[in-house]
Image: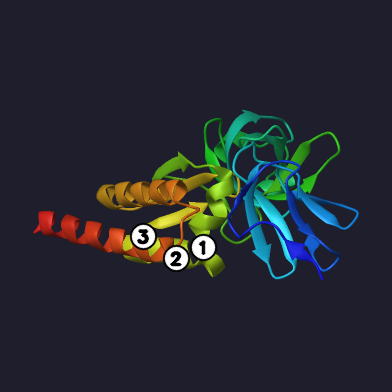
Amino acid sequence: MGKVFVKHKDIVVPGELMAEGMDYVPASGTFREGEKIYANILGVAHLDGRVLKVVPVSGAYIPKVGDVVIGQIIDVMMSGWRVDFDSAYSGVLSVKDGTTSFIPRGADLTKYYDIGDYIVCKIINITSQKLVDLTMRGPGLRKIQGGTIIKVNHTKVPRIIGKGGSMINMIKELSGCKVTIGQNGFVWISGEPERELLVITTIRKIEEEALSSGLTERIKEFMEKSIKELESKQE
């Protein structure tokens, strides 16, 4: 019978023995050597039944097909737009994927997206040359207007979203703000200025305490108390 040498949410280092035995399955951030499973990166051990993985605590965002990201237009070309989404990979949004509307040949593309604009887009392809094809054709994909954009560690995005979207939905409901999180760690927040600031403070708190237990309940209490204080000041 196999044996696990680490606990859920333990910090592990590259080469650290995590488990032994064929009962366990190595996932992202781990590798198998014989019957032993080792950590491949510095991160947090995650045990899900028989599956072992390591969630990185640092490092640049590595894009994956299907990820929704928030990026900034950095160049307008004849065939589309170049998009920076804080990765070593370069993003390209073609004219055909730029909008659900028809864009006529020779159109001024700056009328759709100009340099400096932020967009919510989706990764649809990654080439061997580290070029990322993006699309704006899909639900929730749009040009960002107004609001505030902040950057968080992309490895903390799953914790900010929460299981089944529980954490982010709670933040939206309590604050009354619109919130969109890109897998690359950019977050767009839109609402009343005081509420936007509360969401930013809340997200920073989640980022700092991501590895602690009972976080959802503490965040709920923090937001409810903060909102009461805001409302009392407005009376």
Q: Nearer the viewer, residue 216 or 223?
A: 216
Mark in front: 2 vs 1? 1
Crowd tier of the residue under label 1, counting other residues whose Cα lies within 10 Å: few below 14, some 14–19, many 20 or above = some
Foreground residue among 7 and 194: 7
Check contact, mark 2 vs mark 1: CB within 8 A. Answer: yes
**Left or right position of 174 against 233:** right
Task: Name the residue carrying label 3.
Answer: 219
Of the two numbered discs 2 and 1 on the same chain, state the one appearing first in sequence: 1
224 relative to 186 in the view: left or right: left
Residue hosting label 2: 169
Image height check: is 73 above or below 225? above
Q: Which mark is residue 162?
A: 1
> What amino acid is labelled 2 in the image?
Asn
Along the viewing direction, whichever of 141 and 231 lies nearer the viewer: 231
What is the secondary structure assignment of the residue under circle 2? helix
Q: Residues within 10 Å of mark 3 (few under 14, many from 20)?
A: some
CA–CA distance in space, label 2 to label 3? 12 Å
Instruction: Provide residue 95's location: percent of width, then percent of height.
Output: 71, 43
Q: Amino acid at mark 1?
A: Gly
- Residue at image coords 45%, 63%: 167
Depth order, front residue of 226/98: 226
In the rendered structure, which amino acid carries the disc numbered 3?
Answer: Ile
Instruction: Tell me how far mark 3 sits from mark 1, CA to CA.
Output: 12 Å
